[in-house]
Amino acid sequence: MSKYIITGVDGNFGGVVAETVQKLLPKEDLLFTAPTENGLKKFANSGIKTAVANFNDVAGLTEVFSNADKVLLISMPFVGEKRRQAHKNVVDACVAGNVKQIVYTSLVNATDPMNPSIEKIDHAWTESYVENTALDYIFLRNSQYTEAMISNYFAMIEPGVLGNNQGDGKMAYISREDCAIAAAHAVANDYLHREILNINGPELITITDLVEIGNEVTGNSVKYNEVTDEEDYEIFDKMGVPRTTDGDFKKGSSAPFSSEGMVTFGQAIRLGKMNTYSSDFQMLTGHQGKTVQYMFEHANDYQIGDRHSVDK
């Protein structure tokens, strides 16, 4: 019997992977994990094998991962040494547990040393760490989630101005849902080995283009205003957004990310470091990703939502 492991099924991303992969692989071959039993109940009740997986416990992870065909590592939502350690623990457990392949959700252009994104440091480190083991791998380098920008757009309707530091840089925005669907397909694909795929949306556009699409669909008249990096930090400060992922996040915030991550993302987009545009998503899944217009037309389904991480 095969063994395909999906970690983090209690999260926004992992939940979509869990639902999608059940359509692609036999239920008896699946094992879903989460940091707590609570996040696994609905899957266990539906007959899926489940296990608690603590990313701080290599021995426990090794036992759970033992002899798996694949393990999906969904990158953790915090940034810095804590994330790298959590990822290292998963990779070490995969090696010790004789896992055949790891699938990792990375970031577009992660290994470019000139990419200023603070987020990409952990992704580049994790990719390199995996590459220096005997593990087979698939790295899914995801573009920025459209949901983040749609939530930001709606938060700015009252002031009428969406300000950030992206300027005229372009991004192939993709929905988090599509990134999760791509991850499920990567887990189910037995033909990809030591592969790096760019998971991009179907259109390469500027933030001005995104705002104009939002206005056309909703009838609002939000304007885009380019600001400096420091001004962008000040905007997030006023919203109560913490500068790092170690800060306190407001429930229901339209920006459940650290401002350090978002501002350096904006820098990278402005400098053309995030404009990767490929057909890898379509190749992997067999269909085109959702457009920005479609997501604005179904905006209630494409909000970024709250952070679900329970890791300390």
Image (cartoon, grey):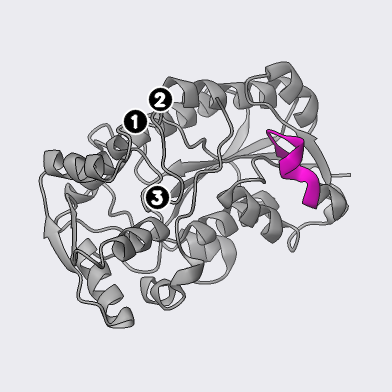
What is the x, y in percent for residue 216? 27, 81
State the count of labels: 3
Q: Are marks 1 and 2 in contact (CB under 8 Å)?
A: yes
Closer to the camera in the image, 298 or 112: 298
Q: Which residue is mark 1?
A: 244
Q: Which mark is residue 253?
A: 3
Residue type for callout 1: Thr
Closer to the camera in the image, 159 or 180: 159
What is the x, y in percent for residue 277? 34, 59
Label 1 crowd (10 A; few <14 / some 14-19 / many >=20): some
Disc with the residue nearer the chain's start (3 vs 2): 2
Does dot 2 land on a helix, a strand or a loop?
loop
Q: Nearer the viewer, mark 3 or mark 1?
A: 3
Does dot 3 land on a helix, a strand or a loop?
loop
Residue type for callout 2: Gly
- Magenta residues (range): 33-42
Name the residue located 58 percent from the left edge and 69 percent from the top edge: 286
Rendered image quadrant of residue 26: bottom right
Q: Which mark is residue 167?
A: none
What is the x, y in percent for residue 23? 74, 63
Dominant secondary structure (helix, strand or loop) of the stretch shown in magenta: helix
Disc with the residue nearer the chain's start (3 vs 1): 1
